[in-house]
Image (spheres, rainbow, N blue to C red):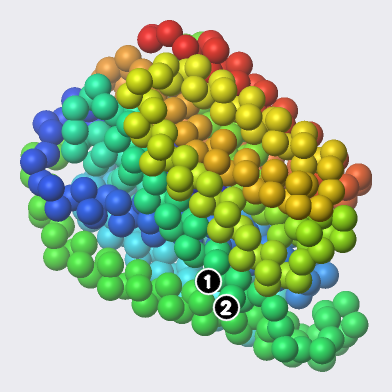
Amino acid sequence: MAMAPGGSATGGFGQAAGNMPQVDAPGLNYFVFALFFIFGGITSLNDVIIPKLKELFTLSFFEASLVQFWFFIAYAAVGIPGARLVKRLGYMRGAVAGLVTMMAGCLLFIPASQSAAFPMFLLAYFILATGVVLVQIVANPLISLLGPERTTHSRLTFAQAFNSLGTTIFPYFGAILILGSLATVTAAELSGAQLAAYRTAESQAIVRGYLGLAAALAVVAGVVWLFRNRLMGEKHEQTSLAEGLALLKRPRFGYGAACIFLYVGAEVAIGSFIVNYLMQPHVLNLPEQDAGKLISLYWGGALVGRFVGSAVLRMVSPGLLLASVAAGAITLIAISANSTGMVAGYSLLAVGLMNAIMFPTIFSLACEKLGPRAADGSGIINVAICGGAIIPPLYGALADATSLAFALVLPAACYAIIAGFGVFARKPA
């Protein structure tokens, strides 16, 4: 996510989507589901690219995690101005702007490959992520418009199951296309012109994958543009940044925003290094491509869990369910870190199932009863997704100093704080 990785906070500073008239346009459901599918899949591809770039540029775990840093830092840099742009353009035109920006990011992989320079790949990821943020800014407010407020928890979780469908499918085929090599040497064995030529040749698989995505995004953007006037009666009110940030003084919202930061960071940290984790001799000892295919199990757990969770959340306290799955994630991490073989590998992959309902539940619990300030809260939470930029590098640095298994203490600590929020917010606001 992930997600986000595996989740998506959207909206911005302005009128709450819940205060806008509900839209009777069934076709928009499919459009929103498609958006969740697209940005979920593209985000999860980072988990496949990281081990590839790590080998090509002989990077440490910390250096490889910079891919996630530059991807998720876009949420902090673009979240608030992006929300203002969407309010100026409207949801449908804002979605087109995001899709076109994503397409530009995909095309930047061409010069990145030709230059054989790691910073160029990071720039491409930042531009790609900028477009993802814009698309996410559109998605959740539309979900709020397409149904009653009382089923928001369930409806948002169901929509994010399509996000998980993308995160399940993209890594599997991405691993087939991108991971593995016919070369008989590695980057560590080369230098000078030979090394540059090797990097250019081996990164062509990345370029081909993202060129295909660019073509698909162009088609989707064209279709959305044709329906740009479909959403009628759309209104937004401008509020100041200071008014929005004042929400952080509310304990329930401030705690929830912090948990979004920690959740995205933990989910992305595990996903970023799970290929390297599974490749270890004492875990599954798999080749790179085979380990990459198993990422689909990590994100597939979130897919299954979100469909199930959308039903369970109609009957169970969202706060208590959140605390339970966070405790489950901690348990699975402890089992993985203290075991070997299939138990170590598959218990960590199973953390994806525990992640399933976390983002939408934290999001909706934090924003509960904000009324006309709901969009302000959504914009702040959108920025909090930058936890995906901070936690993975910390995990990478800890893994460099110790081991991938010991470093799992960091995401476990994140889940412990999230469990506390579930207990804190177990009663309605």
> Is 366 above or below relative to 268?
above
Specify whether residue 241 is in view.
Answer: no
Q: Are marks 1 and 2 in contact (CB under 8 Å)?
A: yes
Estimate the x, y position of residue 342 in percent, counting from the top left. Answer: 76, 52
> Is 285 above or below relative to 181?
above
Q: Residue at x 70, y 36 (%)?
A: 332
Q: Residue at x 83, y 79 (%)?
A: 187
C-alpha distance separating marks 1 and 2: 6 Å
Q: Which mark is residue 177?
A: 2
Q: Residue at x 27, y 50 (%)?
A: 32
**Quarter of the image where the C terminus is located:** top left
Q: Which mark is residue 90?
A: none
Estimate the x, y position of residue 259 in percent, counting from the top left. Answer: 56, 27
Q: Would you say 18 lies left or right of 119 here? A: left
In this orientation, which residue lies closer to the viewer: 40 or 121? 40
Question: Label 1 amino acid?
Answer: Phe
Q: Which mark is residue 173?
A: 1
Q: Residue at x 30, y 51 (%)?
A: 33
Near mark 1 (Cα within 10 A), the count class, few <14, some 14-19 or many ≥20, is some
Near mark 2 (Cα within 10 A), the count class, few <14, some 14-19 or many ≥20, is some
Question: Label 2 amino acid?
Answer: Leu
Label 1 element class? helix
The image quadrant of residue 398 is top right
The image quadrant of residue 143 is top left
